[in-house]
Amino acid sequence: MTGPVEERPGRSAPTEGAQIQGAQAEGAQAEGAQAEGGGQRRSGLRNPDKAVRGLGAGTLALEALVLLLAIQPIRVVGGDLSGAAIAAIVALAVACVALAGQMKRAWAWHAGTVLQGLLLLSGLLHWSLFALGVMFALVWAYALHVRRVILG
């Protein structure tokens, strides 16, 4: 069937102008509701708190994964990786995973910031850890920015 589909008998399709006017009316009602009531959400998310917690937990989980997967390439390509540096990487990865599970607590965001600082400090053990620290500090700063925008 290549032609237009017939409408049901007794019903007529709304014209394009009526559809545009209906959409404008709905938009005006939504704007009026936001201007009048303080109960409207700032973002379009159903549960902004959960979304932000998921962002923080996902960021920390990804950081833990990257840290653990980075051990072998750093040893092979980067040269001398001491036992203290490997222990620091594993400890930071474990802390990331533990903290990802605690993101519903208010202090977890501050602890995540401290964790980024510790990763930067571990750059004293090996230069590549400092590079990872810079990258993840920037990602964490963006996550904090998104949290501030969504939650206000």
Image (spheres, rainbow, N blue to C red):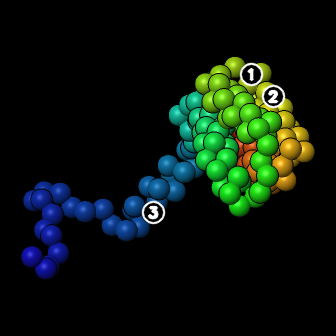
Determine if residue 63 is in view.
yes
Q: Residues at badges 3 and 2 in contact (C-beta under 8 Å)?
A: no
Which residue is identified by label 1? 106
Q: Which residue is mark 3?
A: 20
Secondary structure beneath label 1:
loop
Picture mark count: 3
Q: Position of residue 26 (x, y in %)?
A: 50, 49
- Earlier along the polypeptide chain: callout 3 or callout 2? 3
Q: Which mark is drawn over residue 110?
A: 2
* Left or right of 93 in this view: 138: right
Distance from Cα at disc 2 to Cα at disc 1: 8 Å
Q: Is residue 43 visible?
A: no
Crowding at mark 1 (Cα within 10 Å: few <14, some 14-19, many 20+): few
The image position of residue 14, as x and y in percent, is 30, 62
Residue 120: percent from the left, percent from the top?
A: 85, 43
Circle nearer the viewer, 2 or 1: 2
Is mark 2 in CB contact (under 8 Å) with mark 1? yes
Residues 79 and 90: in front is: 79
Q: Residue flagged by tag 2: what amino acid is it?
A: His
Vertical side of 33 occupied by 6: above or below: below
- Tell me which residue sits at (85%, 53%) in the image: 127
